[in-house]
Every structure is written in C-alpha cells, then in structure tokens.
C-alpha cells in the first residue's frame, strides 16, 4: 500500500493506473532485493531453508528457527514489493518452526514432533484464512501426510 500509493481500505489489484509511472519499477526492486538476499545466503554457506512439509518428511519435524526467520523475511520482502505470492509461507513457517522448537525443548518423540509441527502449520493456515477445518486438512494432508485416529486424538 505505502509504496504504490494505495489508499487505506483500497486494493492494489483494483487500481487502473499508477499516479507515478516510476512506481511500476517497485516489483523489480523487490525482486532485486530478494535475489541479493539469496546470493548473500549462498555466500554465507547457508543451506536452503526447510519448510514444514520437508521437515516432517525428511527430518522428523526438526526445523531451524534461522530457516524460519529467513523465509519470513523473504516473504515480507516479496509481498511488500507487490509480488503475487501469499503470506501463507511465512505464517506456516513461524507456526511450524515454533512448534518444532517447543517439541525439542520438551524432548518429545519423533512422531510427536511431527504431529506438533503439523499442528503449528494447521493453526497458521486456520488463522490466515479464518477457516479452522481448512487448517486441519492442510496439516493432515500436506504436513503430517496421513489421516489416522491416533493423530486426531
């Protein structure tokens, strides 16, 4: 809104023209910033951040809070500069990352960590869309990967 001059309550997608044609460069600037952040992370030898689905499938639900922070910042940059991506990646990353960290703090079993990470992602989706069942289905289908009575209980 601020970068494009959108009035409070208005939508960028509802604008027919920009008051200043130079504002059309704003998404490109955001893309350049994202590219710089990726190059900087690679030069610093950071590995590719792990999302909740990959964490549950490959690492037993273990997620890094550093990865969480990186994805949240990159999501804020891309959305803030007008990229047509949703904020859901940042939401699910925070919910799952915090859940994973709590699970490690309580020394939970691998399966319990996976379920808690799924709950974190499900809660984030439910809050983002104000749709609790959608969040639950997201958690079961995509993050945990299985529907079972034991997981529901």
Image: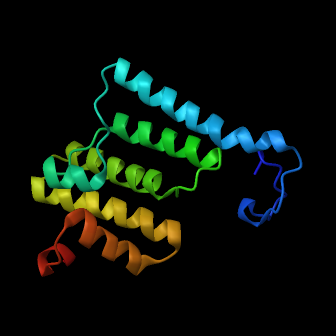
At 31% across and 49% down in the image, what residue appears? 51
Image position, residue 86 (x, y; %): 52, 58
Q: Nearest the camera: 44 or 66?
A: 44
The quarter of the displayed image where residue 148 is located: bottom left
> What percent of the width, then of the height, locates residue 8?
82, 59
Q: Residue at x 78, y 48 (%)?
A: 4
Left or right: residue 31 compared with residue 95: right
Nearer to us in this view, 96 or 77: 77
Where is 136 relative to 111, above or below?
Answer: below
Tell me if I can see residue 109 in this picture.
Answer: no
**Residue 61, visible in the rendered structure:** yes
119 vs 3, nearest the viewer? 3
Q: Is residue 116 above or below residue 22?
A: below
x then y, percent, for residue 32:
57, 32
Give above or below for 100 relative to 46.
below
Judge by depth and name the residue closer to the eye, 82 or 25: 25
Residue 45: image x %, image y %? 30, 21
Visual colour scheme: rainbow
**Residue depicted at x 57% and y 38%:** 31
Outermost residue toward the right? 19
């Amino acid at each position: 809104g601020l970068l494009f001059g959108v009035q409070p309550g208005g939508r960028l997608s509802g604008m027919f023209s920009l008051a200043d044609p130079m504002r059309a460069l704003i998404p490109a600037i955001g893309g350049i910033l994202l590219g710089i952040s990726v190059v900087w992370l690679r030069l610093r030898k950071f590995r590719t951040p792990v999302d909740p689905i990959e964490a549950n499938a490959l690492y037993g639900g273990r997620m890094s809070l550093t990865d969480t922070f990186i994805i949240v910042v990159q999501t804020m940059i891309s959305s803030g500069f007008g990229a047509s991506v949703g904020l859901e990646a940042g939401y699910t990353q925070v919910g799952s990352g915090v859940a994973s960290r709590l699970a490690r703090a309580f020394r939970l079993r691998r399966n319990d960590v996976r379920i808690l990470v799924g709950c974190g992602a499900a809660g984030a989706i439910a809050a983002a869309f104000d749709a609790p069942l959608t969040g639950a289905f997201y958690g079961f289908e995509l993050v945990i990967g299985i529907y079972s009575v034991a997981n529901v209980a």
